[in-house]
């Protein structure tokens, strides 16, 4: 039966495995869950009470009806598991035969099974991990075991790593917006979502904030003055609840520009905070730069590798280019590693809309936060975790339809 096969696979997370040919340049040996995280991994045997099997989906059902039926079966099982004994992490296994019911899209609705289930679980504090059959058959098993083990460790509400080089009096915030473009104008679901990090890069609690009076510019949604002020108030409150004091500095990251009302509203909501940096951060795919290396005769030659990760090019007093995606020697000081190994990487464009912090320090902070995605075992992500997490939270949060004083932990959304 499939559940014996799945149980055996999960037990292998306690075993060691060497990285394969295509993994060795960026992965260390996986020594087993216990060695990697200094804690035991307990996998229940098939037949125990907390193993549940969802009913099969009628193969004759179309994508929409099959997806809705599958989501109902999964949430019913999750309710039963919670009533019996809530595990640290619940694994939801999706066999290949169910893959076509993961998503569907109509003129009125866009459905994603992962986001739907997460939105169901978040208010109840249920941590889940989706696992698909083709993942188990992937040839890059060292990578899979690192990734899956990290996910299970983090979702059991543990912290895998922190940053040590950032100012202890600074709070980092990512703002994301979810816009349902299929809804009728005036009834679109728009959420402002803030996700805080403390100085070590640890994710703190956050709240969903509904934007009451959105402003539209070029198909993007922005906050009004009052909406921005409320978000600023939320940031102050969340930091106060976690640290019992206000931070000396707040840094806010957003993918889109800060309009004048947004800037003034956030500053009003963050009154009492000495320094507020409002930073627009996005990847400009049109920008492509080549790295060069000096020659003995004093000339320059185009390098065979992209621009070094961490390179910052200051454009003026309030803007700079930063190569978060680029060449690194973090794994092996003698070898250049370039994540993805193809295409010329584009830099991040950083534009400061408010604040006085040195752009070099701002770049160092963004570079550090690009290593704080606890949902990935890549060496880094192309955007800081503040922006990555706020986008994901906003997408799932749009399904919650629940706004209020309640806080959530980001790990429930992963």
Image (cartoon, rainbow, N blue to C red):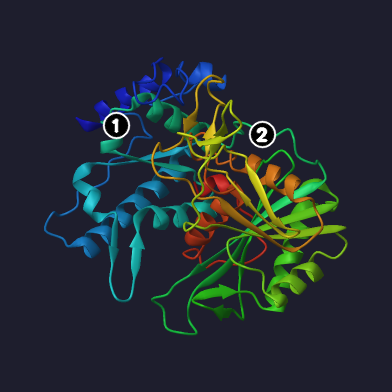
Please name the residue shown 57% across and 52% down the image. 348
Please name the residue shown 70% across and 42% down the image. 364
**How many other residues sit within 10 Å of disc 1, few (<14), some (14-19) or many (≥20)?**
some
In what element is the residue under mark 1? Answer: helix
Using the rendered image of the protein, determine whether residue 45 is visible from the camera's viewpoint.
Answer: no
Please name the residue shown 28% across and 63% down the image. 104
Of the image marks 2 and 1, the number of the one nearer the N terminus: 1
The quadrant of the rendering that contains the N terminus is top left
- Residue occupied by mark 2: 162
Q: Position of residue 26 (x, y in %)?
A: 46, 26
Residue 144 in the image: above or below residue 95: above
Drawn side of residue 91 relative to residue 400, left or right: left
Residue sitting nearer the eye, 235 or 257? 257
**How many other residues sit within 10 Å of disc 2, few (<14), some (14-19) or many (≥20)?**
some
Q: Position of residue 404 (x, y in %)?
A: 64, 66
- Residue occupied by mark 1: 136
Q: Residue furthest left?
A: 60
Q: Are marks 2 and 1 in contact (CB under 8 Å)?
A: no
Drawn side of residue 13 relative to residue 69, left or right: right
Task: Give the mark toward the camera: 2 or 1.
Answer: 2
Dividing the picture into quarters, in which one does residue 318 lie?
Answer: bottom right
Q: Position of residue 138 (x, y in %)?
A: 28, 31
Residue 310 in the image: above or below residue 256: above
Q: Position of residue 327 (x, y in %)?
A: 52, 35
């Amino acid at each position: 039966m499939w559940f014996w096969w799945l149980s055996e696979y999960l037990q292998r997370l306690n075993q060691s495995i060497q990285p394969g040919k295509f993994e060795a340049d960026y992965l260390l040996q996986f020594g087993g869950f216990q060695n990697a995280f200094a804690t035991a991994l307990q996998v229940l045997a098939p037949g125990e009470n907390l193993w549940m099997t969802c009913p099969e989906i009628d193969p004759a059902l179309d994508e929409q009806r099959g997806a809705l039926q599958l989501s109902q079966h999964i949430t019913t099982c999750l309710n039963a598991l919670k009533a019996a004994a809530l595990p640290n992490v619940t694994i939801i296994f999706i066999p290949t035969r169910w893959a076509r019911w993961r998503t569907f899209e109509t003129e009125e609705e866009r459905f994603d099974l992962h986001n739907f289930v997460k939105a169901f679980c978040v208010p109840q504090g249920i941590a889940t991990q989706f696992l698909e059959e083709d993942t188990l058959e992937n040839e890059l098993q060292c990578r899979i075991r690192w990734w899956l083990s990290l996910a299970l460790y983090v979702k059991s509400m543990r912290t895998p790593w922190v940053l040590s080089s950032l100012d202890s009096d600074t709070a980092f915030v990512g703002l994301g917006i979810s816009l349902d473009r299929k809804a009728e104008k005036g009834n679109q679901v728009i959420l402002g979502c803030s996700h805080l990090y403390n100085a070590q890069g640890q994710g703190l609690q956050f709240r969903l904030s509904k934007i009451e009076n959105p402003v539209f510019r070029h198909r993007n949604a922005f906050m009004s003055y009052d909406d921005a002020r409320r978000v600023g108030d939320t940031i102050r409150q969340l930091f106060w609840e976690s640290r019992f004091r206000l931070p000396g500095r707040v840094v806010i990251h957003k993918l889109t520009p800060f309009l004048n009302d947004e800037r003034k509203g956030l500053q009003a909501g963050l009154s009492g905070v000495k320094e507020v940096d409002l930073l627009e951060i996005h990847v400009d795919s049109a920008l492509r730069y080549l790295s060069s290396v000096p020659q003995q005769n004093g000339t320059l030659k185009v390098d065979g590798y992209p621009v070094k990760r961490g390179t910052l090019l200051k454009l003026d007093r309030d803007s700079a280019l930063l190569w978060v995606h680029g060449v690194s020697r973090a794994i092996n000081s003698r070898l250049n590693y370039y994540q993805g190994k193809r295409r010329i990487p584009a830099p991040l464009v950083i534009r400061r809309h408010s604040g006085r912090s040195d752009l070099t320090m701002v770049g160092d902070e963004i570079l550090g936060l690009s290593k704080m995605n606890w949902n990935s075992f890549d060496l880094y992500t192309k955007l800081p975790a503040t922006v990555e997490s706020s986008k994901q939270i906003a997408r799932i949060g749009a399904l919650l339809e629940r706004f209020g004083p309640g806080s959530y932990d980001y790990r429930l959304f992963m």
